[in-house]
Amino acid sequence: MSEHSTPIEQGEDWGSIERFEPHESHGMVTRCAATAALGGFLFGYDSAVINGAVGAIGDYFDTPAGVLGFAVASALIGAAIGAVMAGRVADRLGRLKAMWMAAILFLISAIGSGLADVLWLLIAFRVIGGVGVGAASVIAPAYIAEIAPARIRGRLGSLQQLAIVTGIFIALLIDYVLATAAGGSEKELWLGLEAWRWMFLSMAIPSVLYGGLALTIPESPRHLVRQGRIDEARDVLRKVLGNIDLDAKIAQIRQTMTAKTRPSFSDLRGPFLGLLPIVWVGIGLSVFQQFVGINVIFYYSSILWQAVGFNESDSLMITVITSVVNVVTTLIAIATIDRFGRKPLLLIGSVGMTITLGVMAIVFGTADTNAQGEPVLHGLAGPTALVAANLFVFSFGMSWGPVVWVLLGETFPNRIRAAALSVAAASQWIANWIVSVSFPSLKNAGLGLAYGIYAGCALLSLLFVLRFVRETKGQELEEMTDEVQIMAH
């Protein structure tokens, strides 16, 4: 506790004003969180829609594997840019305006990608959509954390991941339906346009929905306090928290935002390699979430399963089933995260991912190869790989998928939340890009090697959580300030 504690700090525990108040307006809070999480739906949709189109894009533009890998990963470049920009936009213009801007970028990308007739133009529009994805990956967890009561913040924060995996599922389902209706993703479907183009164009519908619903929810009360709009903040807090001591709550929030200058990336500077230790924890969580290779399953799975003997239709159906597993396991996380805590779920997930990725590494590493050097799975090897892949998704979906987004939204202090989230999310997208670009080459070198590397990263993630990640279950956002001071020392 600092020497200059306010009467509120001296007189009662930081979360007690809100934590024991039984009258939160859960319906209002859930609607706000669900609307913000629609950005996650578009995030998942935009990320996965390429899965069903990647083969047709390679044939249409006659691109080699390296260029195709770059085209698939091009949206991730935009996502890293969008994540870095979003924090500053959110702090200066507000969380809602950042959502609207992201929705517009999604819409532009959907139409442009679907109509692009040269590869560089497709890549450019994918980058634009990526900027929207990156912005949404910062804004949604920050907004949800800032508007949710502490005791249900984990569940509401997990809506971001539920929206992401639902977006993945819907995108893959639409890919499957469109490819089946056309007789192949490269075949014409409607209006003289190929099925793969309609896969991109379909994203326009949720983009418009996201932008429209974002007009119906209130601004983050913590952002309003930062801007000095106290009456508006009081009104929002009354709607989402009920009849608590609003003046005391606002005083708590203001105490964590006492600096005289605007929030900026310079606030993240600290004693360990130039950054605050808590920022490095956020970066570590983000990087490990990607380095276990989860997005290989969703970006390349249709091609992957074709490589081991399934046809295009069956491969797309397997991918859809895998995405359903992802949705179901995220629901498990939502039901348990506020009961068991964040850290236990991460540890369980890391163990499960290490085992399942290890099994896949052994199966593919010991498989025979055909004349093209592709693995051929005989007997039980095929079903074993399929089960292991889905158990890997299960392990990820109930842990590292939703829990990382919850932690990124809540673990940073109020003043640096948007900026720190920007850095962590940008790190995540860069790691995602590295995994996506490197996988085609790793696949050619051997799937056993690829999954062995991912298994090693899963094991390292276990050690990282044990050593560096702290439990935040039930803590108020205003309590996170001292957390940085403790870790910095």
Image (spheres, grey):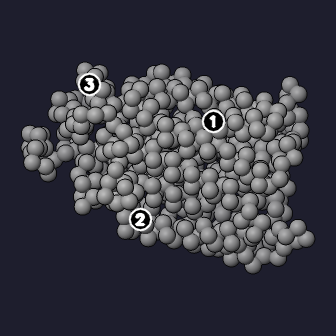
CA neighbours of label 2 inside 10 A, class few (<14), some (14 to 19), many (20+) = some
Q: Nearer the viewer, residue 300 or 176?
A: 300
Of the two numbered discs 3 and 2 on the same chain, state the one appearing first in sequence. 3
Q: Nearer the viewer, residue 55 or 348?
A: 55
Give left or right: position of 278 versus 127: left
Of the two numbered discs 1 and 2 on the same chain, state the one appearing first in sequence. 1
Q: Is residue 218 above or below residue 400?
A: above
What amino acid is labelled 1 in the image? Gly
Of marks 1 and 2, the one in the foreground: 1
The label on residue 129 is 1
Please tell me whether mark 2 sits on a helix, a strand or a loop.
Answer: helix
Residue matched to label 2? 465
What amino acid is labelled 2 in the image? Val
Q: Is residue 22 above or below residue 366?
A: above
The label on residue 476 is none
Corner quadrant of residue 218: top left
- The residue located at (37%, 55%) in the rendering is 274
Residue matched to label 3? 228
Across and down, in percent, residue 317 comes to: 76, 51
Of marks 3 and 2, the one in the foreground: 3
What amino acid is labelled 3 in the image? Gly
- Is residue 117 among what the camera can see? yes
Please tell me whether mark 1 sits on a helix, a strand or a loop.
Answer: helix
- The residue located at (70%, 36%) in the rendering is 124
Q: CA distance from mark 3 to mark 2?
A: 38 Å
Give left or right: position of 6 versus 352: left
Please tell me whether mark 3 sits on a helix, a strand or a loop.
Answer: loop
Q: Nearer the viewer, residue 275 or 125?
A: 275
Across and down, in percent, residue 266 comes to: 35, 44
Q: CA distance from mark 1 to mark 2?
A: 32 Å
- Whether the residues at callouts 1 and 3 have beta carbons within 8 Å, the answer is no
Q: CA distance from mark 1 to mark 3?
A: 33 Å
